[in-house]
Amino acid sequence: MTHSVTLNIPDHLYDPLLEKANQTGKKPEELMIEYLQTMIKNTEDDPVEEFIGAIDSDISDWTKNHELYLGKSLSEE
């Protein structure tokens, strides 16, 4: 079963998508499906997801830089 989704994509996102599609010989729609599949897979396999919201912190970029912070902490031990 498939579903249709209509998106209004701004030029700054569509242009590189179209360029990549042309380079790979795929349609932009095919690349979008691949990107969505990758995003979904990556969010399903997040090893720190169970800890989200468990710690009260003043660090606002923890979600983007958690590996940096954890690595720094381990290297200090």
Image: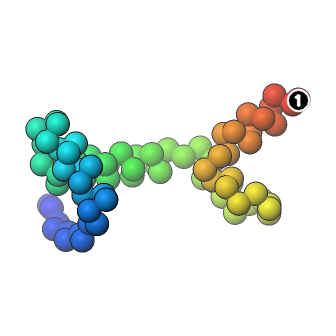
Q: Residue furthest right?
A: 77
| Quadrant assignment for the C terminus | top right
Task: Please determine whether, in this image, residue 39 is positioned above or below residue 54.
Answer: above
Which residue is identified by label 1? 77
Under tag 1, what secondary structure? loop
Q: Residue at the location (14% across, 42% down)?
A: 22
Between 39 and 25, the one lying in front of the other is 25
Name above or below for residue 54 compared with residue 23: below
Residue 75: x and y in percent read 81, 28
Residue 59 location, x and y as percent?
Answer: 76, 57
The residue shown at (16%, 68%) is 4
Question: What count of labels does the image hold?
Answer: 1
Q: Answer with left or right where residue 22 lies relative to residue 76.
A: left
Image height check: is 71 above or below 58?
A: above
Look at the image and name its color scheme.
rainbow
Which of the 4 image quadrants contains residue 12? bottom left
Drawn side of residue 62 relative to residue 5, left or right: right
Residue 62 x %, y % = 68, 53
Q: Foreground residue, 68 or 4?
A: 68
Q: Residue at x 74, y 39 (%)?
A: 70
Q: Position of residue 51 (x, y in %)?
A: 68, 54
Please identify the quarter of the rendering in which residue 21 is found.
Answer: top left
Q: Amino acid at mark 1?
A: Glu
Residue 5 visible within the image: yes
Residue 33 visible in the snapshot: no
Residue at 61% x, 50% y is: 64
